Amino acid sequence: MKNPLLEPFDMAPFSQIKNEHFKPAIEESISLAKAEIEAIANNKEAPTFENTIAALDYAGYQLDRVTSVFFNLNSAETNEHIQKIAQEVSPLLSAFQNDITLNEGLFKRVKTVYEQKDSLDLNGEQQQLLDKRYKAFSRNGANLPEDKKERLREIDAELAKLKLTFGENVLAETNKFQMHLTDESDLAGLPEGAKEAAAQLAKTKELDGWLITLDYPSYIPFMKYAENRELRKKLSLAFGSKGFHGDELDNQKNVLKIVKLRFERAQLLGYATHAHYVLEERMAETPEKVNNFLQELLSKAKPAAEAEFKQLQDFAKETDGIDQLQKWDSAFYSEKLKQKLFDLDDETLKPYFKLENVIDGVFKVAEKLFGLSFKEVTNIDKYHEDVKTFEVYDASGGFLSLFYADFHPRPGKRGGAWMTSFKSQFRKDGKNVRPHVSNVCNFTPSTASKPSLLTFNEVTTLFHEFGHGLHGMLADTTYPSLSGTSVYWDFVELPSQVLENWCYEKEALELFAHHYETGELIPMELVQKIKDSATFQEGMQTVRQLSFGLLDMAWHGQDPTEITNVKSFESKAFAGTQLYPETPETCMSTSFSHIFQGGYASGYYSYKWAEVLDADAFAYFKEKGIFNKEVATKFKDYVLSKGGTANPMDLYKKFRGAEPKIEALLERAGLLKSA
């Protein structure tokens, strides 16, 4: 069988790939990568930076390409067949990684080069790579005795499968639930666009009436606008109880197994906890620093959050006689209160945020800041017809990147929004290999009568993911493992979060916020209302984010071996941040994919950490002008293009001239007055 994944390819050959191609391609690519690794390990020449460290970084290129196609599809366009293959190949890939890090001959060569590093005259990027490569061995068991190495292999293989199962269960739970409504009065309060989308969804399932699901574009408008409190409750409990039903999709045992295996792994490697292991390679450095950071922010945000919660509680009581505000009341009354205070609601704003216009807007912002241009192309192979494809060029017309954009929910796509890549940037043999970058989101789709109109929250999400995209597109490093978003995890959110700031600025909104029917520019009083409302309930939002960070640190920053009950452990972790009454039917941990499936274990705090960086960075732009070329060029040269080639704090200081200050975040969030 001719396998398109084993033929040389530049752009992923999606239309030629069949499910049965994946496993053979991955197995063959592992064999090829193993041969490359063995050649490095058994090289008769003395170890040098080039023949060992650099050679290792370029090894396994074909495997990287094949697995990036496969795992990206497993997130954005999956099916039972692909999920089954993922379960089969994940242990193989985990074993291959362990074969590298536990290869004594290879480690010996790496260690020899590492011990000579002071006499090797390496540049900064080479020093970073050598350091990273040595730590990849030492932090993953290369110095362990044989029996412990074997246990490490077992743990890694088991963790790989558990994380996949966790994610599959969450996706299955999301797809399984549907609230089928046939009485139009149950939709009272919903905007016309949301009703039309619900009717369209029902039609696709050959049902009469309306269908509400747990996908964000369906779930959020219902929670925000539906007047039927009982139905909001039903939907909220379904959303909050994913993986928590004691059935075959239950994730409680998976959570406990994952945290206990991570702890055992950390202990094997000589670390007190999984958080100690992870944070050694982060800007934050230690669990103590993370917890202090979270608690400092909590002390500033909690008084504001409690005052905001009381205001919301009083408003709900006065409006509808609600004695006790519940979680399913939050979005509904917050939206009503926001409308009352600012005379602003998402439905007023949506006509100004047609998806195509917002895409054009983010492109224009990138053009004004970094001189980029984007050309939509239709002859590029795609994995789904919804995907848009663009070629990206720099100011002098040089090709920079291929960009895939996939914006709407569908059954085979996990929830949320993310940036990923199908091909990394690097330099080799005098050639600068350019990246293929992708943004995947779940935005409100178009309906029979309306194009895709985004909520303001979706606009900021699009800018956020595009910020990650720019980090990938503008990458300009020599080695693939230091390129683009391959940076410390608590630095990776800076480019994404800083770009969100442009959504609130008149100069930026003027570029794209035009009414989809009349072409009228968004009225400036609406822009002012967006800015005025930007800190609405910021205390509550901050406390919510901090609660997730604290839950993550609770799971990973201590010995979890005695934990037997996921829900009661979670409730204790949330105790200091709780505003709403406890709901025994729900559990956050069993669907907390960021930390149990994605890479955010011991790293969820980084969203807030990066907000400190982004508020401080944007204050610099504001000071000089939001499209100031000098500041933008510094941001591109010292942050976006440099990837992981230097210590992130050093890069930030080169851009900003000083370390970031927490005050910029507190001021932007309106929390200084509460502190």
Image (spheres, grey):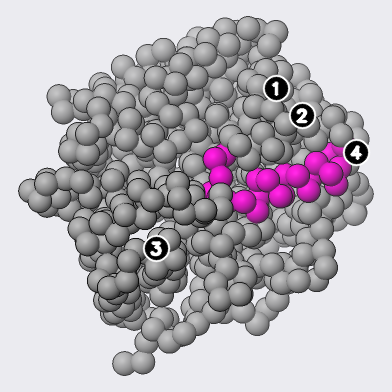
Of 120 and 21, nearer the camera is: 120
First reached walking from the N terminus: tag 4 or tag 1:
4
Residue 658, placed above or below residue 172 = above
The part of the chain drawn in magenta is: 625-648
Give the amino acid type for the residue marked by disc 3 in the picture: Thr
Q: Which residue lies furthest to the bottom in this view?
A: 1
On-image quarter of the C terminus? top right
Contact, mark 4 vs mark 1 (Cβ under 8 Å)? no
Give the amino acid type for the residue marked by disc 2 in the picture: Ala
Instruction: For residue 261, say whether it is visible.
Output: yes
Of 566 and 53, nearer the camera is: 53
- Which residue is the site of mark 1? 664
List x then y, in percent, for residue 431.
61, 75
Label 4 vs label 2, nearer the camera: 2
On-image quarter of the N terminus? bottom left
Give the amino acid type for the residue marked by disc 4 in the picture: Pro
Using the numbered discs, state the Cα–Cα distance from disc 1 to disc 2 in whole angstroms. Answer: 7 Å
List x then y, in percent, for residue 456.
70, 40
First reached walking from the N terminus: tag 1 or tag 2:
2
Contact, mark 1 vs mark 2 (Cβ under 8 Å)? yes
First reached walking from the N terminus: tag 1 or tag 3:
3
Question: In the rendered image, which quarter is residue 41 located in?
Answer: bottom left
Of 281 and 306, nearer the camera is: 281
- Which residue is the site of mark 2? 619
Q: Residue furthest front?
A: 119
Give the amino acid type for the residue marked by disc 1 in the picture: Ala
Query: Element under label 1?
Result: helix
Horizontal side, residue 28 vs residue 300: left or right: left
Query: Element under label 3?
Result: loop
Using the numbered discs, state the Cα–Cα distance from disc 1 to disc 3 in whole angstroms. Answer: 46 Å
- Which residue is the site of mark 4? 523
- Which residue is the site of mark 3? 48
